Image: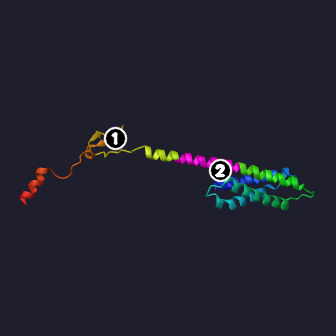
Amino acid sequence: MLRASVFAVVATSLAAIGHVNGGGHAPDPAILIVLAALVGASVSGLADRRLSGLQITAMLAASQVGFHLLFEVTAHQSGPVDVARMVSFHLFAAAASAWLMTVGESALFRLFAALHRLIVRLRVAAPICVAPSWTAILVDHSCPGQRRSLAASVTRRGPPVALRTAGHSAG
């Protein structure tokens, strides 16, 4: 949702700037908010995967056409607009938005990859050695600075050998 929101705000802001620089009327702030919410909702389904620069540019170029049409419909402008100038500024807005989004997307995924590598390294690196509190404690050389219990160092199990043989001969 954060990626879709950033995409929507950047695309809407640069579309409004491009429209005004192209000779159009400044859009109403309420219309900008509604358009940003609509764009954010429409691209939120694409936020679960990484997009290429070409995909981002195509989406932004299409959104610029939609922005221009909606800005013209909602504007109260009586004079004619220079179409070539308007198109060039909307194309510039699409190119600037695409560049910002592509660079931001790349930086975001590099950051996530670095965090993932750090988490994996931290998870593997630190052994945890905890001895039960009720046994005698010995120094454990496999965990520097840690102690282990005496019970953990004894490997044989069961009663002493003399008791095991005595139980069989008595029965």
Residue at screen point 74% across, 51% down: 97
The residue labelled by disc 1 is 142
Prevailing secondary structure class for the magenta stretch in the rendered image = helix
Residue at screen point 31% across, 42% down: 148
Residue at screen point 34% across, 41% down: 142
Q: Residue furthest left?
A: 170
Give the SS element for disc 2.
helix
Give the SS element for disc 1.
loop
Q: Residue furthest front?
A: 54
Q: Residues within 10 Å of mark 1 (few under 14, many from 20)?
A: few
The N terminus lies in which quarter of the figure? bottom right
| Region of the chain picked out in magenta, as a range | 100-116
The C terminus lies in which quarter of the figure? bottom left
The residue labelled by disc 2 is 105
Q: Tell me which numbered mark, 2 or 1, is placed earlier along the sequence.
A: 2
Looking at the rendered structure, the kind of residue marked 2 is Glu
- The quadrant in which residue 126 appears is top left
- The quadrant in which residue 67 appears is bottom right
